[in-house]
Amino acid sequence: MTQSVASLAVETLIANGFDNLYCLPGVQNDPFFNSLYDCRDTLAPIQTRHEQGAAYMALGAALATGEPQAFCVVPGPGLLNTAAALSTAYATNAPVLALVSEIPSSGIGRGYGALHELPDQLGVLERLTRQAERISDGADAHAVLQRAMTALRSGRRGPVGVEVPTDAWSAAVESVPDDLVAPVRPGPEPDTAAIADAAQLMTGAQRPMIIVGGGAQDSSAHVTQLAERLSAPVVAFRSGRGVLPSDHPLSITTPTAYQLWPHVDLVIGLGSRMAMQQSVWGVDSDLKIIHVDIDADEIGRFGPPTLGIHADLADALPLLADALDATQADRSEWRAELEVARADAETATAEALAPQYGWLGAIRAELPPEGVFVDEMTQCGYVSWLGFDVYRPRTFLTAGYQGTLGYGFATALGAAHARRDVPVLSIVGDGGALFTINELATAAHHRIPLTTIVFNDHAYGNVRRIQRERFDGRVIASELTSPDFVKLADAFGVQGVRAATPDELRPCLREALSSDEPTVIEVPFGDVPFPWPYIMRPPIRGQQPRG
């Protein structure tokens, strides 16, 4: 039976488990939305007020669920408006499908000045994603869509792009298989000899430490098993938070890990570049490194490890645990050192950054363990990397190394839309909030129960602090005139309240997190201690850090 590329795209998305499509329709994708109309109860269109909102919502939904999510936008300015979200999806290994229209096929590359024409749009999309292709006509549509679906679920995750010229949406597709579910590529086979060598290194280590990144988010049980077998503390900087619950005795914060770092004799990196530890804290010849990652290019990114294992953690970790010698080294002394370091480092950090810890403590007291917390490039957001307890995988969402100012609100909105079964809380500064606060209209329209705290200091606070402290108080272009966010929330038809202290915040949070409506809580915010000396610590080991 003949069908159009547009209808095939809709059917392929549904067959591969997509329930929602974050989108902003336009003339170049009208045929696609016409096909979607008849399936809108199965693949729900979630229209946003800006293309960046659509892409960020897909990002948040992907990070919170671990499942591929999709957005659809027009070409040119539409695609470019999603670039920050795509770069953040790339940085955080989020499986996001960018379904992007293109100008008519006859005009591509000719410079006619067609509506929304962008020089080499596919080249732009290729550089923002892990894989991008164009559907040229009905003959290649099925193959392109299948490759995209496979890429979203195989190997190292990340954004994938599919570009469709305006005329190609209506092109006829003569024949496709009945089963549109795309296959998943098998992961790399773990090297048995490397597994044995790693087990020997781990068995003999006296002071092992495990570092987890975003690649370990779906391997919590296996990481826990390995850590307990080795009595190895587990640390995550940002993207790996929650892999080992904060209330587990082997879970440590970055300040604790830093204090222990000079004494570690074996570090095991799981789904992490170990960038901070290797390139900032420093390494030396006494430190052995085991690096396990599904992406071969990441193994040894900051210098050759003692042993690299190219494998999916789901395959490698059970083998490593089974291969460990039943007779482990006595690590009771190491556990004792861990407790001392934890008490020293966490107490010192909490005292130094007491105002931020006070706000984060109020949030943690009211947000249930399964609740999702979305950080931002704001003072409490930075400190949350150090001092916010996380109890479940995929409940601490971050922009990772991209540090995307302004990503937080719309990303949290996507998380709240995809995870209506748990409370979702976003913290933003007044500077970052105004990047996507227009999506309050989307929250109201779709009744998305997101709770947002806006810390309002009428500045790009981090920038202003650096200007004051490092550039002799020469403050420039960092002070802002921000709105009354309570009134702004009211203008969008959502609840807005204000809290001046952590004690005032708690009842506001209690009510908001139990509501099925969006809420904005404005917190007037003054100067607080500078957190970065506690985040970017100086080298503590070795003469020459890697990187």
Image: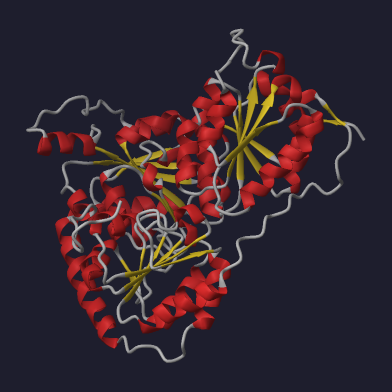
Residue 158 percent across, percent down from the top left: 54, 46
Please name the residue shown 41% across and 41% down the image: 408
Q: In this view, does 105 lie to the left or right of 369?
A: right
Residue 41 shows up from this direction: no
Residue 321 higher or lower than 288, as above or below: below
Residue 212 percent across, percent down from the top left: 41, 63
Please name the residue shown 81% across and 25% down the image: 171
Colour scheme of the rendered structure: secondary structure
Between 334 and 547, the one nearer to me in the picture? 547
Residue 195 shows up from this direction: yes
Q: In this view, does 490 lie to the left or right of 150?
A: left
Residue 456 percent across, percent down from the top left: 27, 37
Write down the quadrant of residue 503 in the picture.
bottom left
Between 28 and 118, the one nearer to me in the picture? 118
Q: Is residue 131 left or right of residue 227?
A: right
Residue 490 higher or lower than 447, as above or below: above
Residue reaching furthest to the top = 112
Please name the residue shown 38% across and 64% down the image: 305
